[in-house]
Image (cartoon, rainbow, N blue to C red):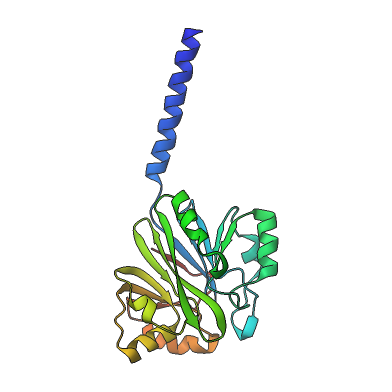
Amino acid sequence: MLMNNIINQILSISLWAGVTLIGYSQSTEITVKFIGNCGLYLTDGTIHLYTDFPYKSGAHGYMEFAESELDSIQENALFLFTHKHSDHYSRKSLKKIRKEKNGKAFGPWNSKDLATLSESIPNFTIESFKTKHAFSLNHHSYLITWHGKRIFISGDTEHAETIGSLNTIDWAIVPYWILLDANEKGIDLDAEKFLIYHLASVQAPSAKEKWGDDPKFHPLIDQGEMIKI
């Protein structure tokens, strides 16, 4: 009996050590996949976060996406929405996905719950900011801090004051009109790199011409493109 207890203790310690080593060896690299519009899939291999996706494919003349994008959504994922316009949000698709694959959804309607979420996940927080969007009564932008990296998700807001109030952003993911607004108002944007999203197909050629060779700015045009952070 004593020998069995000793063996069980050794096995328990070994199992704990193995789990600990796996935790420490986890990659801190974050991959961002561009799905379309403001729809992104961000993952470090453990946490799976979708922003402004699923949305209604082709809504308001913006990007369509393949049905396989819905099929490939990860189990128990997190869904973060800036607002409920159909080119950013689909209640029908989200309901179906959560029924089949679980997951938690967050948006302006329950942004206070993000604090509790952040407490439950190491090295991961989401701060919510109420921002203005001319065609929405309830729009939020977000600052995600993940493995020490600060990632700003703008959504559809037309105003640069919120992002302009933040310091040392590693990656700012914004529509081009935020850059225009900041320039017009003389607002300095303290971000190391910018991903420009929500570009209509007709804007792609001019976006490539304007930012194609600038390492600080990268327009998200090609659906399925992967960016490493």
Residue at the far front: name it. Answer: 112
Q: Quadrant of residue 145?
A: bottom left
* Residue 88 place in picture, x, y as percent: 58, 75
Residue at the image point whose x is 31% and y is 84% from the top: 187
Q: Quadrant of residue 83?
A: bottom right
Pick the front one: 72 or 185: 185
Residue at the image point whose x is 65% and y is 65% from the top: 94
Pick the front one: 187 or 171: 187
**On screen, 127 above or below 60?**
above
Residue at the far bottom: name it. Answer: 184
* Residue 27 place in picture, x, y as percent: 40, 51
Q: Quadrant of residue 178?
A: bottom left
Q: Is residue 149 left or right of residue 219?
A: left
**On screen, 25 above or below 104?**
above
Residue at the image point whose x is 45% and y is 75% from the top: 154
Quadrant where the C terminus lies?
bottom left
Residue at the far top: name it. Answer: 1
The answer to whether one can see residue 155 in this image is yes
The answer to whether one can see residue 217 in this image is no
* Residue 165 place in picture, x, y as percent: 33, 75
* Residue 68 place in picture, x, y as percent: 65, 65
- How many marks can you see? 0
